[in-house]
């Protein structure tokens, strides 16, 4: 399939149950992941780890796009092949995180994502290097008196402005309004905050004349806060998430790829599968997992060359399980 238009690229990224490998951890975040496995984070160790993922068999057929951090888009594999070419050779497309992270929005601990000021210039360069899509993450917190409407409006406006600039540079924007799981809140509170974010986001995307057929939404699922005394069940999460999407997301959007947000790898797969077993949706429902795709691989790797194949197997298994879940074809017996 010739991927010439934004619509073609967006449709390809989430075709046939394929999803995204989110490997765009900033240098600080990958440092924390490496600390947990007693591995020093250097340019070479980051390259070695990501190269092993991109060379894993499970990339083929299961991963439609890989989200990269700036450093990785410019890096070469050990044998000199650009990592972006390695990704292309698996059938997946390389993409790039373009937001510059969060800073305080007010004195209520709310945050705003930045990076718009030079985004047009950066996008032109990323497109020339070969990126086909981009990601921008907005962060919304639930707590006492938050989220405020002002914070939701400011973050969703930035997402809509970002999406417009990215499409002008012929790349597909992934818009990620993440309502965090942190806290004691109920799944109902998560539902309300998520509904507000999505409603606001799509009205601002419409105002900016963003082409939804060339856009992917990366939302949180509707889950209970991590410290909530009562935790919503898998079927409740599936039903609430489908309800919030059906009520707030226009049907001409190209696709939806969830973030994992701190869910365990198995739970993230189970939730995705439960939603796709219900089905009947106007968009593909897929995955764009960071931790939920990489945790088992990181643990198997432990920074040791000898563990490379075990790490690749762990990643390949999760990639396949999530592709099956994106088609509603997963079951617990497939787990090893
Ligand atoms: P998690 O799946 O670990 O939440 O990461 C996805 C991501 O890209 C967050 O921006």
Image (cartoon, helix red, strand yellow):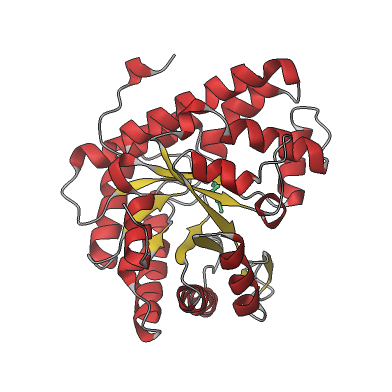
Asked where in the image residue 38 lies, by quadrant, the reply is top right
| Residue 178: percent from left, percent from top | 50, 58
Image-based side of 187 in relation to 304, left or right: left
Residue 132 seen anywhere in this rendered image of the structure: yes
- Residue nearest the viewer, comparing 90 with 102: 90
Residue 234 seen anywhere in this rendered image of the structure: no
Q: Is residue 244 above or below residue 112?
A: above
Q: Residue at x 34, y 56 (%)?
A: 2
Q: Is residue 212 above or below residue 227?
A: below
**Residue at the extreme left of the image, as rendered:** 280
Indicate the quadrant containing the C terminus: top left, top right, bottom left or bottom right: top left
Image-based side of 76 in relation to 228, left or right: right
Q: Residue at x 34, y 74 (%)?
A: 211
| Residue 108: percent from left, percent from top | 65, 70
| Residue 288: percent from left, percent from top | 46, 47
- Residue nearest the viewer, comparing 37 with 111: 37
**Residue at the extreme bottom of the image, as rendered:** 207
Q: Is residue 183 above or below residue 212?
A: above
- Residue nearest the viewer, comparing 225 with 91: 91
Q: Residue at x 53, y 74 (%)?
A: 155
| Residue 173: percent from left, percent from top | 46, 66
Image-based side of 255 in relation to 299, left or right: left
Q: Residue at x 54, y 68 (%)?
A: 146
Count of numbered circles in the view: 0
Image-based side of 317 in relation to 191, left or right: right
């Amino acid at each position: 399939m010739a991927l010439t238009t934004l619509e073609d690229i967006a449709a390809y990224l989430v075709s046939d149950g394929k999803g995204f490998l989110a490997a765009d951890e900033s240098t600080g975040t990958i440092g924390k992941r490496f600390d947990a496995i007693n591995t020093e984070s250097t340019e070479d160790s980051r390259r070695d780890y990501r190269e092993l993922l991109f060379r894993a068999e499970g990339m083929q057929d299961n991963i439609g796009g890989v989200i990269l951090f700036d450093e990785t888009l410019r890096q070469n594999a050990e044998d000199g092949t650009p990592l972006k070419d390695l990704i292309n050779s698996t059938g997946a497309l390389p993409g790039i995180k373009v937001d510059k992270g969060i800073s305080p929005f007010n004195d209520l601990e709310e945050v705003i994502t930045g990076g718009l000021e030079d985004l047009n210039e950066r996008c032109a360069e990323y497109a020339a290097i070969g990126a086909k899509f981009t990601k921008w993450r907005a962060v919304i917190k639930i707590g006492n008196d938050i989220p405020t409407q002002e914070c939701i409006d400011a973050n969703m406006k930035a997402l809509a402005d970002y999406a417009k600039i990215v499409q002008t540079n012929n790349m597909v924007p992934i818009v990620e309004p993440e309502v965090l799981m942190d806290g004691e809140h109920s799944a109902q509170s998560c539902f309300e905050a998520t509904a507000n974010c999505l409603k606001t986001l799509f009205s601002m995307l419409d105002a900016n004349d963003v082409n939804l057929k060339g856009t992917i939404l990366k939302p949180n699922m509707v889950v209970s806060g991590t410290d909530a005394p009562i935790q919503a069940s898998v079927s409740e999460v599936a039903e609430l998430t489908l309800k919030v999407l059906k009520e707030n997301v226009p049907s001409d959007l190209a696709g939806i790829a969830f973030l994992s947000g701190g869910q365990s790898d198995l739970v993230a797969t189970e939730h995705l599968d439960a939603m796709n077993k219900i089905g009947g949706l106007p968009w593909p429902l897929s995955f764009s997992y960071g931790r939920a795709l990489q945790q088992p691989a990181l643990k198997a790797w432990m920074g040791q060359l000898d563990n490379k194949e075990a790490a690749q197997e762990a990643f390949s298994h999760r990639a396949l399980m999530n592709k099956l879940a994106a088609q509603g074809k997963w079951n617990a017996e497939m787990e090893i």
